[in-house]
Image (tube, rainbow, N blue to C red):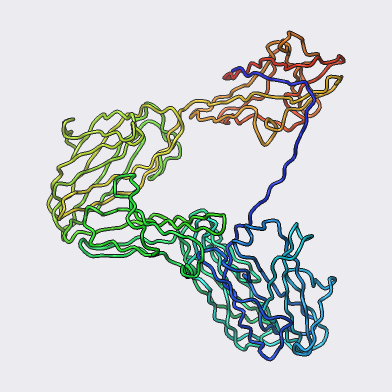
């Protein structure tokens, strides 16, 4: 394989630009109705945050400092906070920076003093340690300033008053009850997704002195801050229910704990209904009040009819986060529904798209069918399992066997259609029902989307209740040009209006491989070189230094024989005027090198059963350019590298 290498000898000018990363953390409602009503605050606490989905409509706190904390002399407690501005304000002045200042009072708010800097008074979180018993009251101010903290102030918030009572002795917690602000969080990466909440606890007695530690049972679904109880859902679309637990370990090592649950999803749940009955899809979770939004927003509901890729708008005139499906019929079974919410705040527009929820419509009288399916590769077995076939290549014999049972207490199978997904280009060797081969005109092979999706179809199947029959399909694989995976899940269905049904087998995964060594060699550049460079080693540009590879290899050979890789420089570097570059390529390995001109150099080799990996080096190794003791004429130089991949016996 050949690749062209270019070198440009000129004066280079570099411009470094800066960027801004948006903080996409969603916030939660934090109460400002502090219980320390006998304490006069330094300033009135900021009102509660109003929100729609994950959008802040005003500034405030995600996490307030706890209104009451009990501790003992010499023990450190942390008052943690999390504050923010409105989404609109943050978009209008994205470079504003917050400055924090804590204040404390020991006389119930009659006088307030700044907590000094050396006691973390200018930080978001405050560590409090007291060497004497008594009550100390704290309040935090956050002020945002333009120009990264050097400009004018543009916004501020005040926390609720936090009381810290310091006792001489520990006091055990006896009972804890855990709750969460929101029991449904979204797993969508949208900027306006409500994907965080806060866990809270009611503890008896209230003057317990130890800390609550928060945990969840599945970090793939959500993460929790062990100190504050802030819960953050995943944004990868992983759905499920996560268990949230708060635990207190008392000073005498006794433990109290309690748990609650938070559902993680895309906003909608599947619905099941009988034909002719109505049902509604509703956005789950804490949405917020739409009427509180002063800006434009739209709510649109869409449907994807079963068996199609159509996107049908079914409702757009109402700003309603629920949609009524009125008297669906069996033909609507497996239709998909979703909602799209668009919101404009100032000059910025945001969008949330829910998951697609399935509508399951059950007929009044249908057969109960069990489909037990299996698939085997008769040609090659590489750690194949009951549900996964590996390394399926061209020429492989793949056989499907499906046992179909009609329930004895159900209706008859009438005018059923059997559908088996197969690989595009597959040849059908035989199709048998109950070990009797059927004629080719009894089944059809249908290609969808230009052969991307192919199915074998047998229609007009009729069986009585309690009957069992078997379908065997033997195929020969052909047409694999790239590594890919297919999920084959056979099903049997009927489109009869009054007796429609669909029953599916289990999913079987078939991993197709080309059974060849696939490689891609990149062009190499050495950037701009000083015309007066002499006796210098020039590294490659960053795009061909690790972690990037010079030769990308995907070794899909099922039988991996030893292989050697060689490279040589075909000719000298020459520019467009015919000038020869006083230099050559060398293959370096930790200071040692071999020149590539006029000789073939071994780059790497493998052993039997060892896959060939991609080839790449750090900037000090691999193919480096050496400039000899001569001046370099201006111009763009190039040469050709020959890469050879040889099987080794």
Residue 438, image quadrant: top left
Residue 430: x and y in percent read 23, 31
In the depicted structure, whether residue 246 falls above or below residue 638 = below
Residue 500 image position (x, y, % from top left): 19, 53
Identify the residue at horizontal 41%, vertical 29% (top origin).
393
Residue in the picture at 69% in, 68% down: 155
Q: Nearer the viewer, residue 53 or 647?
A: 53
- Closest to the observer: 52 or 632? 52
470 left or right of 517?
A: left
- Image quarter in which the C terminus is found: top right
185 relative to 426 in the view: left or right:
right
Q: Is residue 516 left or right of residue 82?
A: left
Q: Where is residue 270 in the image (x, y as percent from the top left)?
A: 35, 60
Q: In this view, does 144 lie above or below 137?
A: above
Q: Quadrant of residue 8?
A: top right
Q: Which of 193 and 415 is in front in this view?
A: 193
Q: In this view, does 588 lie above or below 77?
A: above
Q: Position of residue 208 (x, y in %)?
A: 66, 85
Q: In this view, does 422 lie above or below 218?
A: above
User: What is the count of numbered marks?
Assistant: 0
Closest to the observer, 259 or 121: 121
Extreme-top residue of the structure: 578
Quarter of the rendering occupied by the N terminus: top right
Inspect this view and state whether residue 168 appears: no
Q: Can residue 632 be seen in this view?
A: yes
């Amino acid at each position: 394989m050949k690749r062209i290498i270019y070198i440009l000898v000129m004066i280079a000018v570099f411009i470094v630009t800066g960027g801004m990363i948006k903080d996409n953390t969603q916030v939660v409602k934090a109460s400002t109705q502090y219980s320390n009503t006998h304490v006069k605050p330094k300033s009135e606490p900021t009102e509660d945050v109003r929100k729609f989905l994950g959008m802040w409509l005003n500034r405030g706190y995600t996490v307030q400092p706890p209104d009451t904390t009990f501790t003992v002399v010499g023990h450190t407690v942390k008052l943690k906070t999390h504050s923010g501005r409105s989404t609109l304000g943050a978009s209008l002045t994205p470079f504003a920076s917050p400055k924090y200042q804590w204040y404390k009072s020991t006389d119930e708010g009659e006088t307030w003093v700044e907590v000094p800097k050396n006691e973390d008074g200018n930080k978001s979180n405050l560590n409090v340690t007291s060497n004497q018993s008594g009550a100390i009251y704290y309040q935090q101010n956050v002020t945002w300033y333009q120009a990264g903290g050097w400009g004018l102030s543009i916004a501020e918030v005040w926390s609720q008053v936090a009381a810290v009572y310091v006792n001489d002795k520990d006091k055990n917690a006896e009972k804890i009850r855990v709750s969460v602000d929101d029991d449904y969080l979204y797993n969508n990466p949208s900027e306006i997704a409500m994907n965080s909440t806060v866990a809270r606890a009611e503890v008896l007695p209230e003057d317990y002195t130890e800390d609550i530690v928060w945990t969840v049972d599945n970090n793939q679904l959500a993460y929790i801050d062990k100190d504050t109880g802030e819960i953050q859902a995943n944004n990868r679309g992983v759905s499920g229910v996560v268990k949230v637990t708060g635990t207190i370990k008392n000073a005498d090592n006794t433990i109290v704990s309690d748990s609650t649950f938070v559902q993680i999803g895309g906003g909608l749940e599947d619905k099941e209904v009988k034909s002719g009955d109505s049902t509604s899809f509703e956005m789950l979770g804490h949405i917020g009040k739409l009427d509180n939004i002063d800006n434009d927003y739209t709510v649109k509901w869409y449907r994807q009819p079963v068996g199609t890729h159509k996107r049908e708008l079914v409702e757009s005139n109402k700003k309603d986060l629920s949609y009524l499906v009125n008297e669906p019929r069996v033909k609507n079974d497996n239709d998909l529904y979703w909602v799209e919410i668009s919101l404009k705040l100032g000059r910025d527009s945001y969008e949330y798209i829910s998951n697609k929820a399935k509508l399951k419509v059950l007929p009044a009288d249908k057969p109960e069918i069990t489909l037990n399916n299996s698939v085997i590769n008769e040609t090659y077995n590489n750690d194949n399992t009951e549900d996964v076939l590996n390394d399926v290549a061209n020429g492989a014999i793949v056989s499907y066997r499906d046992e179909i049972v009609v329930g004895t207490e159900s209706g008859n199978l009438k005018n059923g259609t059997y559908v088996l997904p197969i690989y595009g280009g597959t040849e059908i060797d035989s199709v048998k029902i109950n070990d009797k081969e059927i004629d080719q005109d009894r089944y059809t092979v249908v290609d969808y989307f230009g052969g991307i999706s192919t199915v074998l179809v047998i229609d007009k199947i009729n069986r009585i209740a309690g009957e069992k029959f078997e379908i065997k399909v033997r195929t020969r694989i052909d047409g694999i040009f790239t590594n890919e995976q297919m999920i084959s899940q056979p099903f049997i269905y009927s489109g009869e209006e009054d007796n429609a049904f669909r029953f599916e087998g289990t999913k079987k995964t078939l991993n197709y491989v080309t059974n060849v060594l696939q490689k891609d060699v990149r062009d190499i550049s050495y950037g701009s070189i000083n015309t007066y460079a002499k006796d210098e080693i020039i590294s490659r540009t960053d795009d061909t230094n690790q972690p990037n590879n010079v030769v990308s290899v995907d070794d899909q050979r099922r039988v991996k024989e030893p292989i050697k890789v060689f490279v040589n420089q075909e000719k000298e570097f020459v520019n467009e005027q015919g000038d020869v570059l006083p230099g050559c390529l060398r293959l370096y390995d930790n200071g040692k090198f071999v020149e590539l001109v006029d000789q073939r150099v071994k780059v790497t080799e493998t052993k039997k059963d060892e896959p060939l990996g991609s080839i790449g080096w750090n900037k000090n190794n691999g193919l480096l350019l050496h400039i000899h003791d001569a001046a370099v004429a201006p111009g763009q130089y190039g040469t050709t590298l020959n890469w050879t991949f040889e099987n080794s016996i």
